[in-house]
Amino acid sequence: MFRITSQPIDLAAVRSQLLDTGCGAYVQFEGWVRDHNEGQQVLRLEYEVYEPLAIREGQRILDEAIQCFGLRKVTAIHRSGMLELTDVAVIVGAASPHRGEAFDGCRYIIDQLKSRLPIWKKEHYANGMAEWVNCQRCAEAGHQHEQ
Amino acid sequence: MKIEIRYFAAFREATGIASEPVDTQAETTAALFAECIDRYPALRNYSASLVAVNDEMADWEHALANGDEVLFFPPVAGG
């Protein structure tokens, strides 16, 4: 199940709810708040989420991953609001009978979550400025966004 | 026809408002957004934006109907 929360994510609970006797592999991805981006020193991040659409689109992505990669159990949670350095901004858990599907499915889910959900990230910098992160800016510059 | 427009994140800051009712002749989401750029030139700086109509993702050819709620999303950046 996909959900959005303004509270810290209980990492152990994510794993335990996916335990499955038919699964031999579990891959968990955590996205952390990092202290730098594109030469700027980052102090904290702020996520704005349009929840009605984000939840529906997030669930669609999880359903696609189950269909396409043969995952048995999946979950993903994305934070909203203000986050501090090292906080977990997003978590994806993918369990499957074998490790290949779990790795591939987990990768698919996080990549799709980043590009399809109506979620915006504002970086607050050490110099007192704050800016919305605009992935398009990187696409136009012709380089991969460092994330 | 009457349309309710909502702006998010950088768009809300560029326009200075979260939402507004408009009376428009625009037939598509693209035409409606072009009108918004006329009113708020700062929106011109963004490409790869997304649009939703009545809480469903839509494309820029989407035909508008009276009473629609149109959501303009700047480029997303989850994760």
Image (cartoon, coloured by chain):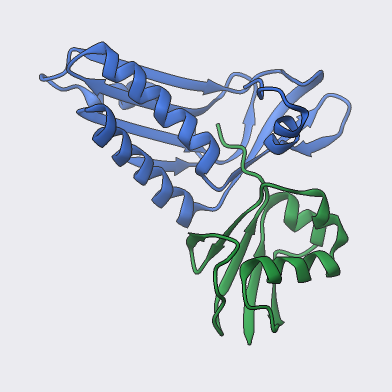
Chain colours: A blue, B green
Residue in the image at 81% along x and 27% along y:
A125
Is B70 displayed left or right of A5 in the figure? right
Q: Position of residue A116 (x, y in %)?
A: 51, 43
Q: Is residue A57 above or below residue B39?
A: above
Q: Quadrant of the N terminus of chain A?
A: top left
Residue A5 falls left or right of residue B67: left
Residue A132 in which image quadrant: top right
The image position of residue A20, as x and y in percent, is: 15, 22
Quadrant (top left/top right/bottom left/bottom right) for the C terminus of chain A: top right
Residue A102 appears left or right of A78:
left
Q: Position of residue B10 (x, y in %)?
A: 74, 50
Q: Residue at x 63, y 79 (%)?
A: B3
* Residue occupying the far front of the picture: B61
B79 relative to A117, above or below: above
Q: Tell whether B13 sits left or right of A18.
A: right
Q: Say which of A118 and B64 sits in front.
A: B64
Residue shown at the point (75%, 23%) measured from the top left = A42
Q: Could you say where residue B5 lies in the image, as x and y percent from the top left?
A: 65, 70
Q: How many marks?
A: 0
User: In which quadrant of the rendered view does residue A12 lie?
Assistant: top left
- The residue lying at 43 percent from left, 20 percent from top is A29
Query: In the picture shown, does residue A10 fall above or below B38?
Result: above
Residue at the outermost bottom position: B1
